[in-house]
Amino acid sequence: MKLKVCGMKYVENIQQVAELQPDYLGFIFYEKSKRNFEGIIPELPAGIKKTGVFVNEIKEIVISLVEEYRLDAIQLHGDESVDYVADLKKQLATRRLLFIAENKEIRKKKNKHVISDEKVEIIKVFGVKDAFDFDVLKPYLEVVDYFLFDTKGKDRGGNGTQFDWSVLDQYPFEKPFFLSGGIGLEDVEEVTKIINSALPIYALDVNSKFESEPGKKKIEELKKFKKGLTGF
């Protein structure tokens, strides 16, 4: 089970969370978000995937930020169409090859994690409340790597509330997904139950329930949460 800590904002806090070795760190590039990221991402340990979160963003801006921050994954949290995702995926693949070729000298001097040969993962978010029509996912199956199910609320993520997880019992696909939406330290037992089910849950995504303020994570609570799930 992978762990993603989203809504990172402050350099020192980023470094502290990175010491816990989550699999993904999320940086929100959305001006309307209280966790909008505009800073510098410090060097991270190998194995942590830098994830950019975007909401209905212009594709060229997404690509530019992927290259600027060396993002390993992008999370599309808006109303992005299948055509939008497919075209973005194609452009990212093309630009990645060009970027690697143009920067091969840099790569000789840096850790491979800085300029990776791996493709940029695409995560498409869908909001869920008390019900969900899983048929809307079908057109996206071929163009995304993962789905992410979050609570439908007034904000695009970070609402701190959970949706009814039993809705996922009707999930009909093998495509792995992230589970998000108001997951906190008090939910370890329930989270353990659902990740031990037959559902193809790939990762947990945590954010606001582990904050002292928007963008600043509580390290000790994250440690306890991770230990509760993994035993270490």
Image: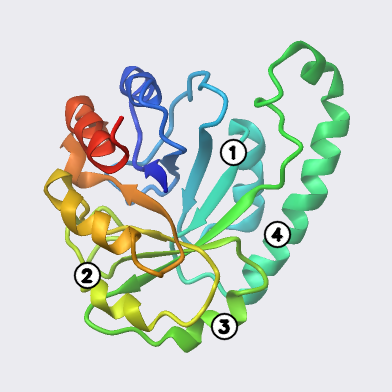
Q: Mark 1 highlights which residue?
A: 71
Neighbor class of circle 3 (other Cα within 10 Å; few <14, some 14-19, many 20+) is few
Image point (55%, 50%), residue name: 74
Q: Can residue 204 be seen in the rendering of this structure? A: yes
**Farthest left residue?**
186
Q: What amino acid type should be assigned to the residue bearing mark 2? A: Phe
Please say if 64 is above or below 163: above
Closer to the chain start, of discs 4 and 2, is 4
Q: Mark 2 highlights which residue?
A: 163
Label 3 secondary element:
helix
Q: Residue 28 placed where, x, y %?
A: 41, 44
Image point (53%, 70%), residue name: 80
Neighbor class of circle 1 (other Cα within 10 Å; few <14, some 14-19, many 20+) is many
Image point (55%, 30%), residue name: 47
| Alpha-carbon span between mark 3 and mark 2 | 21 Å
Q: Mark 3 highlights which residue?
A: 138
Closer to the chain start, of discs 3 and 2, is 3
Closer to the chain start, of discs 1 and 3, is 1
| Alpha-carbon span between mark 1 and mark 4 | 14 Å
Check contact, mark 1 vs mark 2: CB within 8 A: no
| Alpha-carbon span between mark 1 and mark 2 | 29 Å
| Alpha-carbon span between mark 1 and mark 3 | 26 Å
Please say if 134 is above or below 188: below
Q: Can residue 156 be seen in the rendering of this structure? A: no
Q: Mark 4 highlights which residue?
A: 89
Specify whether 52 is left or right of 22: right
Please say if 123 is above or below 70: below
Closer to the chain start, of discs 1 and 4, is 1
Neighbor class of circle 4 (other Cα within 10 Å; few <14, some 14-19, many 20+) is many
